[in-house]
Image (cartoon, rainbow, N blue to C red):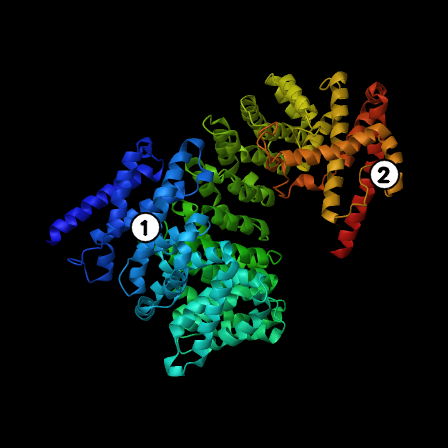
């Protein structure tokens, strides 16, 4: 008889799967036919209500949950949950689905709930129900809480559901004890595995309690807490040989689950410290290991409350630290995670500082036993909190993390599972290494010591083997190439690997690769220029020209390319003449087919950088290519383009404006045969406009940074608020224009708000134009005002007639601006000299 029954089960299971597949992405139109749908629902409700045959049921729990009839139940509940999620609320439906949703709610949602409650009642009386089925049923109940009609059906049985089904599911049970004893590593893994949570009755029970308290807290919250308090009391009153350890475990889990609500609600909020002292602290020395673990977890949940007695905080911290040496692995792991909260909440690091070496030792013992990303997060928190104090431990930390990383990678490769915790822990190890490197960034000698430990990781993970951790590895390389005293030949050996990755599969990481490449060129310029085996200049050109010419790449994909060309021109001034024309050619070719405004700005800035690199050479190349007029007309047009709001449409970052200033200013000292008078006048006026805009933006940024609204930075010469009108006149701005400037600030704010709306006038977000790079550059030391006036003086001395003609053609407004800039440049020159003297005296 067993075989026919199983054949029927398999058939029904197949029907369920077909139905599930059909509704998983989109409900088929045929389903909306009432006759068809009613037939399906009769089948599903019948399956739910029909008892599972006892005949043929396996005794082994693993085989039992996979048995055909239980799979039928699982798939049926799955489908009904899916339908309820889609059609359980008619208010959320499209007009064409509302009638169907109302029919489903009226005829079936309540019946499904009744069937689910009957199924749950089986476990209340000691019967069997697979974990996944329990989990799915509790999901349905949780979704029902917020809907009045469903809650009214649930409410008469809520007391039984909550206290006789949900709470027992939250308690430590026989299966937990067996796993704790036989395989503590698996117990830990399951306890911290997100995937396991999706199938766990305990997690679904916690979610139900949280949802009930959040949506129907009135009465239910108080009643549930009273039940927990009564559980605590029964535990305290029981003799030691009869204490209900498992019920206490469930009560502690409930307190931890509801911590956010309890922290916000009186009278419980005022009693939390006393609750910890009375009901949690004693369990740190419980004979039951699971209670010691739960005590550590709960303490971590409440580490951030305001302790009226700091001795209680100190006691909790010491108990958690002691838990790191507990003989039971799960207790040690839960203690590590709780420690993270205490480190974050600790106001006096002297509580931890004396035991820091021992803490780190315990950490690495655990890392050798357990692969878990949360464990590494705690280590990150400690490193971040202590900063440079971690210097004595930096090398050892990196060595241990590197060893843990390799172990995690080996486990991940062996399991070949994308959700493998070893892979997640490997990422955590690399993130922790980055945190350590950042914490000791002002101690460059340590990077020399750490480098040999990290090099094997960097070499291996820059290949296709490291795609899952590529971003984290690039961050480490960025730190190593930026903070080390010099870039070693071993670190230079990573350059070809990054180039190969970019050419092969890593174009999505181009922005991340940009940072270390910039460091190589800017911090080890001589090696970049001199070395021919490998030829770094050639390999960079091969990569950049290929990327820029690739018609399959979108504009945003290649944004790092012009930034890298800029790095070359700015850092190798006068030393890469042979590359100016090739880079200009590929830049102009891409510029002609670029749509995205931000990329256009970056490409124009390559031309500006080339002019700043060598104006005569660059201008000659542009003329020889026959593109000079085309390029400058586009550039000037982009400089003058504004949005409807009045804000500048292009070159909106400080860096953009500065590069354009330096490029245009470099043209001013050219002889007349290279830059005719008409072009000179246009360049001169645009440069003045740019300098004014740059000054305003720097001033505004200074205000935001200082948080000082009283500091007036609008004029070039204003030290006091009363000087504002005089400064405006000096800059050639009358009172009416001053009002317009104030209006423009409001318009800028409005434009920023509008950027969050879908109907903005262009598709470039403000994020594109934020000063997000903050990378060091040789032009950081170049003041554009001083550079401008120095160039003007060269023109004035070399060709006084040309200079006189230029000034005479300027209208009054530009003459006033030029005068203001001249004065401001002298002020900047004095400030720079003062800064240099201060640096010299401090060194």
Q: Which mark is residue 660?
A: none
Q: Position of residue 363 (x, y in %)?
A: 47, 67
- What residue sits right under mark 2 in the picture? 717
Q: Say which of 186 and 746 sits in front.
A: 746
How busy is the neighbourhood of tag 1: few (under 14 within 10 Å), some, or many (20 plus)? few
- What residue sits right under mark 1 in the picture? 416
Residue appearing at x 75%, y 19% in the figure: 672
| Residue 224 seen in this snapshot | yes
Q: Position of residue 552 (x, y in %)?
A: 45, 27
Give the structural element (helix, strand or loop) at label 2.
Answer: loop
Could you say which quadrant of the image residue 277 lies in?
Answer: bottom right
Residue appearing at x 83%, y 43% in the figure: 830
Q: Position of residue 478 (x, y in %)?
A: 54, 48
18 horizontally vs 300: left or right: left
Q: Earlier in the sequence, mark 1 or mark 2?
A: 1
Q: CA distance from mark 1 to mark 2?
A: 66 Å
Quarter of the figure that contains the C terminus: bottom right
Q: Could you tell me how many numbered marks the image carries?
A: 2
Q: Position of residue 81 (x, y in %)?
A: 35, 46
């Amino acid at each position: 008889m067993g075989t026919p029954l199983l054949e029927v089960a398999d058939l029904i299971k197949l029907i369920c799967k077909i139905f599930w597949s059909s509704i998983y992405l989109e409900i088929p139109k045929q389903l909306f036919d009432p006759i068809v749908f009613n037939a399906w629902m009769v089948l599903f409700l019948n399956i739910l209500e029909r008892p599972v045959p006892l005949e043929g049921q396996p005794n082994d729990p693993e085989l039992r949950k996979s048995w055909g009839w239980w799979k039928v139940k699982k798939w049926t509940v799955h489908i009904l949950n899916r339908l309820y999620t889609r059609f359980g609320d008619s208010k959320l439906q499209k007009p064409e689905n509302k009638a169907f949703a109302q029919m489903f709610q009226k005829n079936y949602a309540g019946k499904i709930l009744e069937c689910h409650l009957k199924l749950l009642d089986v476990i209340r009386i000691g019967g069997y129900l697979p974990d996944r089925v329990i989990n799915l049923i509790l999901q349905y109940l949780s979704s029902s809480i917020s809907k009045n009609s469903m809650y009214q059906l649930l409410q008469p049985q809520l007391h039984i559901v909550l206290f006789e089904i949900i709470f027992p599911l939250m308690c430590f049970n026989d299966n937990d004890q067996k796993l704790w004893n036989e395989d503590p590593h698996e117990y830990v893994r399951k306890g911290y595995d997100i995937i396991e949570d999706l199938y766990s009755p305990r997690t679904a029970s916690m979610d139900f309690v949280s949802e009930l308290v959040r949506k129907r807290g009135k009465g239910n919250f108080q009643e549930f807490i009273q039940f927990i308090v009564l559980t605590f009391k029964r535990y305290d009153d029981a003799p030691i040989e009869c204490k209900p350890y498992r019920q206490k475990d469930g009560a502690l889990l409930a307190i931890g689950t509801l911590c956010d609500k309890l922290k916000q609600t009186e009278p419980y909020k005022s009693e939390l410290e006393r609750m910890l002292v009375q009901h949690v602290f004693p369990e740190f020395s419980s004979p039951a290991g699971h209670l010691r673990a739960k005590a550590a977890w709960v303490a971590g949940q409440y580490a951030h409350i305001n302790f009226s007695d700091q001795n209680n905080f100190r006691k909790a911290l010491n108990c958690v630290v002691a838990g790191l040496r507990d003989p039971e692995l799960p207790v040690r792991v839960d203690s590590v995670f709780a420690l993270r909260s205490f480190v974050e909440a600790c106001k006096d690091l002297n509580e931890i500082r004396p035991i820091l070496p021992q803490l780190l030792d315990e950490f690495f013992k655990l890392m050798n036993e357990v692969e878990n990303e949360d464990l590494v997060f705690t280590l990150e928190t400690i490193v971040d909190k202590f900063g440079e104090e971690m210097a004595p431990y930096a090398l050892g930390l990196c060595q241990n993390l590197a060893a843990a990383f390799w172990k995690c990678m080996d486990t991940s490769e062996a399991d070949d599972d994308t959700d493998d915790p070893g892979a997640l822990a490997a990422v955590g190890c690399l993130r922790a290494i980055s945190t350590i490197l950042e914490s000791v960034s002002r101690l460059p000698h340590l990077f020399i010591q750490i480098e040999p430990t990290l090099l094997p990781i960097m070499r291996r993970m820059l290949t296709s083997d490291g795609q899952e951790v590529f971003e984290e590895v690039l961050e480490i390389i960025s730190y190593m190439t930026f903070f080390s005293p010099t870039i070693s030949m071993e670190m230079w050996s990573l350059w070809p690997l990054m180039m190969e990755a970019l050419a092969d599969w890593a174009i999505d990481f181009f922005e991340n690769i940009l940072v270390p490449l910039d460091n190589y060129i800017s911090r080890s310029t001589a090696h970049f220029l001199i070395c021919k085996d490998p030829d770094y200049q050639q390999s960079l050109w091969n990569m950049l020209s290929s990327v820029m010419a690739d018609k399959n790449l979108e504009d945003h994909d290649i944004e790092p390319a012009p930034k890298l060309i800029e790095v070359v021109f700015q850092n190798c001034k006068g030393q890469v003449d042979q590359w100016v024309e090739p880079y200009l050619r590929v830049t102009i070719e891409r510029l002609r087919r670029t749509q995205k405004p931000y990329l256009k700005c970056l490409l124009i800035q390559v031309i500006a950088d080339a002019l700043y690199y060598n104006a005569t050479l660059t201008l000659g190349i542009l003329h020889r290519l026959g593109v000079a007029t085309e390029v400058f007309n586009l550039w000037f047009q982009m400089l003058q383009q504004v949005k409807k709001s009045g804000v500048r449409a292009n070159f909106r970052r400080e860096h953009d404006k500065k590069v354009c200033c330096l490029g245009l200013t470099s043209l001013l000292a050219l002889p007349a045969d290279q830059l005719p008078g008409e072009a000179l006048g246009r360049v001169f006026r645009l440069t003045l406009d740019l300098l004014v805009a740059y000054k305003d933006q720097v001033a505004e940024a200074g205000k935001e940074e200082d948080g000082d609204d009283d500091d007036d930075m609008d004029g070039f010469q204003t030290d006091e608020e009363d000087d504002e009108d005089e400064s405006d006149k000096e800059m050639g701005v009358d009172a009416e224009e001053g009002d317009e400037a104030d209006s423009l600030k409001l318009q800028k704010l409005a434009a920023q708000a509008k950027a969050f709306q879908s109907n903005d006038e262009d598709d470039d977000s403000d994020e594109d134009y934020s000063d997000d790079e903050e990378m060091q550059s040789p032009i950081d030391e170049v003041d554009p005002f001083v550079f401008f006036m120095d160039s003007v003086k060269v023109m004035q001395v070399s060709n006084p007639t040309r200079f006189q003609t230029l000034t005479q053609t300027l209208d009054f407004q530009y003459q006033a601006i030029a005068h203001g800039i001249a004065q401001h440049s002298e002020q900047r020159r004095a400030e720079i000299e003062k800064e240099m003297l201060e640096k010299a005296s401090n060194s």
